[in-house]
Amino acid sequence: MRQWFKAMAAVGLAAAVLAPAVQGAKKAVKEPRLPKKDYVFKMDFNPSEMLVYSNAFFPRNHKRMTTPRGQALFEVGKKDTITDMAMSPAGNTFIAVYRTKNKSVAQVWALDDVDPVKKFEVNNKKSGNPTAGAYTPDARTLLMATSTGVHMLEPRKFAETGSFELPFEVTSMTVSPNGYYLAVSGGSKAAVYNLEEKKLRKEWDFGAKVTDMVFNVESSQLAVLTADGMASIYDTRTMLVKKTIDDLGQGLACDYNFDGKYLAVATDPSQIVLINLLNDERETYDVADGLLTDLRFIPDSRRNTLMTYTTLNAVNAKRMEHLAPYYGKLIADQVNERMNEWMKMLPGETLEEYQARVNEQSRAAQMRLFESEISTQLAGDQLSMAEVSLGKYNRTNGMLQVDFSTMPSILLPVPEDNITAFTDAGDLAFSDVRYGVLPDDNFEIIYAKVLNRNNGETYVYDNIERMPLSFMEGDDNVVSLEIIQQQMMEEKKLQEIRQQVVERSKQQNIISDHTNITVDSRVVPDYDANGQRILNYLVKFTYEVEPEFSAEEDFKPGKYHVEESGAATSMLAIVKAAFEGDFAQYLKEGKKVKINISGTADSSPIIHGIPYDGSFGEIVDEPVWQNGELSPMTITDKAMQNEQLALLRALGVRKYLNDNVQDMAKMNTDYRYEVNVAQDKGGQYRRITTEFTFIDAF
């Protein structure tokens, strides 16, 4: 294996497309300007599969894996055969499963080392021979399929943390992005497991070889592709088939695009079919060089969509700029965000006043209003792109059909006495046009004023009361008003606790009026890994300090212990008071809570090094989110980078919670760390935020 940094330095122009986010690699490769054309990465071998990390791909065949420029990262001997490989979501290691003459071997390799980190090599009856590997999306668990079942391992030391049996020999595995599900396949058989409970959810025998299994980004769909040219789309909540897509040739490989609106399928060695899953429209791409075996969507360095696919001695990267966004999903997300704010109690609002303002009717009306506003904003000027024509007139109901080349027709109420004035669609002028989105993700006009210049009359088309966007998710996405009102009253108590702690901190000169601490909460509908509807409770704590006072009331340069920040200690004092008081009911032993801690730092240069005192234990390859990507972070006796300082501030919060908040350590805690380094300098960029999501809280 070649050194990772040397290999990436040889990538050259590919770095513009790939720009991998492995810690340190970003500094090793300067990104050239992204070419506007599609790109071909020539190889000296025929790649059969691609491993993907962030916006990087690593082609491999049965003998080796390389960088896009052909620099070898892993190779086996002449008589050995690679059977499966998987890349860590943190981008620092990969698992390689290969067959030798007498046995199967699995090894974990680091991308910046020349020797394997660990080897999983056994022939005993208990562990069995390895056949496939996969990582959980948080990079904290390595899953190894063997002849005896799935073994759950800690990636760095291969220490086993759990196992469960399999109904057949597995040759391929994939884990859903939310970590709920493990999908396995072998031959014509496939199965899905609830990974947390190690419980089988569904098992199939498709009668044809399973060639690929992929989850969409929200983990709500699983696509299973088989060699008879059939793609079956399953709802992971029910494990029932939602859609079947046939006529897909040999069904070699498939992948969802980033928002899950499209599915790309390699139908044979020379063709890719792109399917719009909302309206079943297809686009076909011919692959001139042939030998197509795998395809994957990846982002480029500017987060644009690339479709990468293997061909004869090459990997191609094709730009997919024409893909329309998933408008329905965008609208639903923004509506939910606005509704969360609208549902909050106003300052000084009593419970009676809140109940009068927020009821089933007003909530539905407000959602409809937000949907119309957001849809209209996203639609842009659809009319300017459409040809308008006049259709038939229905004398029974007095409706004139107005047709559009790019949208559904509308029925305009026109008295029969006025119909003779409608002679040409060019005489019509539209104003105050509002749009909605259809189930197929196309736009439609739901309201418009239409002026007929021939007679000067204005006619109003009003279909605002049509079925709203909630058809996408149904009533399961709506939280009952009873729960909302309960949450509002609890947030009111939370604000009272915040005010008490803040006043006490001010009296003790820990902070002043220049520090603003905020608390926020909401109920979030969700599903568990068994497909059961649950309600999660999200509580967020954050603060801001005015820039000129940040050095006094927040972290000083190079400091990371929470007690070294008056603002941080005050915020965490609110957490402690809340979770040991009115909110203690949510801290139940064994119950799951996801804790997202964000630590930030400014860009002040660290010249002489900042010592790490070891307070948070050994920190080696800790999975950390930065700029939306997961990467490993190691801290030794000196924190040399601002990213490491930001992580130490986040780890300080974890230590505080475990040491000071009663019953927190008894819960099933899932910590996620985010680090952010501002481009500017100043104490206002050195802070922390903490978000708790209590799973199935109600």
Image (cartoon, helix red, strand yellow):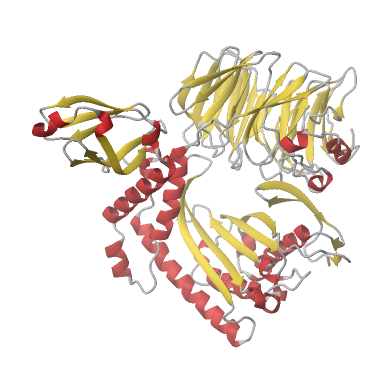
Position of 225 compared to 635: left or right?
left
Q: Is residue 562 visible?
A: yes
Where is residue 133 drawn, in percent x and y?
73, 32
* Residue 559 percent coordinates (x, y): 76, 70
Give the left or right position of residue 49, taking residue 178 as reference. Answer: right
| Total marks in image | 0
Vertical placement of residue 307 versus 593, above or below: above
Q: Residue at coordinates 74% horizontally, 47% vertically from top-left? A: 631
Q: Which residue lies furthest to the front in this view?
A: 454
Please indicate, yes or no, whether residue 621 appears anywhere in the rendered image: no
The C terminus lies in quadrant: bottom left
Quadrant for the N terminus, please. top right
Query: Looking at the picture, how far across and down is residue 126, in whole percent?
Result: 77, 32
Above or below 147: residue 362: below
Extreme-left residue of the structure: 417
Residue 534 in the image: x percent, y percent? 46, 48
Q: In which quarter of the image is residue 351?
A: bottom left
Residue 85 placement, left or right of 433: right
Q: Residue furthest bottom?
A: 507
Please name whichever residue, 350 or 537, is drawn nearer the observer in this view of the structure. Answer: 350
User: Image point 84% across, 23% down: which residue?
Assistant: 103
Instruction: Answer with the quarter of the image where residue 205 lies.
Output: top right
